[in-house]
Image: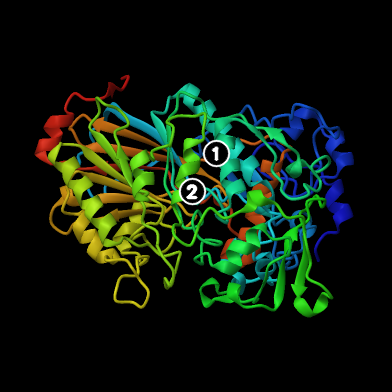
Amino acid sequence: MAKTKANRNEEIPTTGDTTVASVLTRRNFMKYSVGTLASIYMGTTIYGCGNSTTTSSPAPWPISKDVYTTVQKQVLPVPVSSAEPQINPRDLKLYGEFGYSAWRIGPGLPCTKWESIAPDYAGAPNAALLLSFFAMTDIHIADKESPAQPLYVGWMQSYGPASYGLSSAFSPVLLASTHVLDAAIQTINALHKKTPFDFGISLGDATNNTQYNELRWYIDVIDGKIITPSSGSHIGADTIDYQKPFQAAGLDKSIPWYQVIGNHDQFWMGSSCEDEKTLAAHVSNQVLNMDNSPDPSSGAVDRTGYYMGVIDGADPLGAVILSGPQENFATPPTVVADPDRRSLATRRSTTLNWMKEFFSTSSNPVGHGFTQANLDNDFACYSFMPKSAIPVKIIVLDDTCKGPGQPNYAAGCIDQARLDWLKNELQGGQDNNQLMIIAAHIPFRPYKNLVIDPVQVASSPPFMSLFIPKPYPGATSVVSDTSLLAILQNYPNLIMWISGHRHMNTITPQIHPTDPTRSFWEVETASLRDFPQQFRTFRIYRNSDNTISIIVTNVDPAVAPVSPATTSRGNAIAAARIFGATPSIIADATSRAVNAELVIQLTPEMQTVIAGAGTPVNP
């Protein structure tokens, strides 16, 4: 028998890293000491916080002073008891009551050495630091009050694995996407003060639904501007914590950051090419009417039958309203229209307007990688050298679908123009003795499931094919996963492919069958939207034997005990459990982080080039 809410509210949380309060009333919030409160983290129970009066200068949302990577400490979900009832996505009040959103801070996750593509490595230590950067991805900044979302599709799902993946349509993480990004940026700044980053990169899906206001919130958070995280009539902006305007901290101006484009940045909900109906829906006052099909590739958005609703900004928990079968409404439900909700995509281009916004910024560099040539050619690929004295080149590749009629807009795609460009960039890096990293949104041949340990590599985990090549009807990709691999392994100086998209942290060694120098690592970074809400740091070292080590580390954004970002973390854990809802997920108490030292063998030529390069490591 599950405990009642009253009993839960009287339980005193244990401090340290052993448990977490899943529910905390405001009475008990005041009862606990400051020292105890610092180690208590909740899911969806503390809300409406902050100054209740409107001020001319919105306040910031500070993070915890205790900033760490997952090597030191990590966020761990608290397992849900089998005695607890199964709850549905819309049962927001029950997320905390039955422990679905509970988490704790646990001991760190050690960094494991992966030698899967370096058979001759003899354990040489790190000798000099070549490059340090951070990567974040799939932030999905969302206008939760936009009438152009398919909220009802996720809102009305039932508990269980049949709902898997539909949290992309609705999840209460939509409430605080700007706050989570702001917390991540503050965490990056704190880490930068300890060990400086040379640059940062964001790997796509900055926005949730390719809207102008979503992208402006994204850039403005990183720029450190005042954020008004609501739209239309701005309901709840004076009283509800996640609706209140706030002062973003902004990324440290000494860190240049670069941008990759994703499918959600260009397409309606990342799944459909914008058409007359969806383009109008963004700026309409009528709530979107579409089919309730859970399959986004089925054309459901161009049918009718159900009003999709909006999130109620006056509700501290963020319930979906104005939704349901169309026969339940005498007239179409309406909201206050907002021209800032307009789609950045047009019938002619899905990338041009999106790229243009990165030139309106106060952080560095202007354009964030995109140049006037990118705008002139409507081409979202570029490359850059982060440090002039270090021979490492970053190749930013747009590997998303283009044009109407694609079979799957979440699939990877490289057309002939982009393939020719990629080959030219790779050959240039090879000819100029530069180590190369490809940064793309969509991974191309990752392990299908989360692989967290090099021991698993020997069992040959299955790969996942993400590129749909011609002659599949509608497909424009000229490469498949395997044909792309064959091309990439022609360039021994390629050391890594980094990406997001799948919202997970899997590491995949792309092993050449005969030549270790033609092998490279594929590293995915989890989303700031869904659990685990993490970003990654990358530190590239020259080892004493002139092999290379890439140390990849996950970071949980630091959050204050009471903030929208804290609530979002609990909501993300709960959504993963409710929509995934298998026994293994419910009982899961792991961070889903992967910290690793990835070893790479270089050609004799590149060993000579990098010998002596970098900042020596203190003995």
Q: Quadrant of the N terminus?
A: bottom right
Name the residue beneath numbered marker 1: 219
Which one is in front, 119 or 566?
Answer: 566
Q: Earlier in the sequence, mark 1 or mark 2?
A: 1
Which one is in front, 543 or 409?
Answer: 409
Helix, strand, or loop for circle 1? helix
Give me the residue at 40% from left, 62% from top. Answer: 402
Disc number at residue 354?
2
Give me the residue at 76% from left, 68% from top. Answer: 323
Q: In this view, does 91 lie to the left or right of 439?
A: right
Q: Nearer the viewer, mark 1 or mark 2?
A: 2
Q: In this view, does 257 lie to the left or right of 396?
A: right
Disc number at residue 376?
none
Q: Is residue 120 visible?
A: no
The image position of residue 486, as x and y in percent, is 20, 60
Q: Can residue 272 be seen in this view?
A: yes
Give me the residue at 36% from left, 46% from top. Answer: 376
The image position of residue 284, as x and y in percent, is 69, 61
Which one is in front, 458 or 359?
Answer: 359
- Give the spatial CA distance, label 1 vs label 2: 11 Å
Residue type beneath disc 2: Trp
The image position of residue 120, as x and y in percent, is 16, 44
Helix, strand, or loop for circle 2? helix
Q: In this view, does 384 lie to the left or right of 220?
A: left
Give the class, few, some or many, for how many residues have Cα within 10 Å of label 1's Cα (few <14, many ≥20). Answer: some
Q: Do the residues labelled 1 and 2 touch (CB within 8 Å)?
A: no
Q: Quadrant of the C terminus?
A: top left
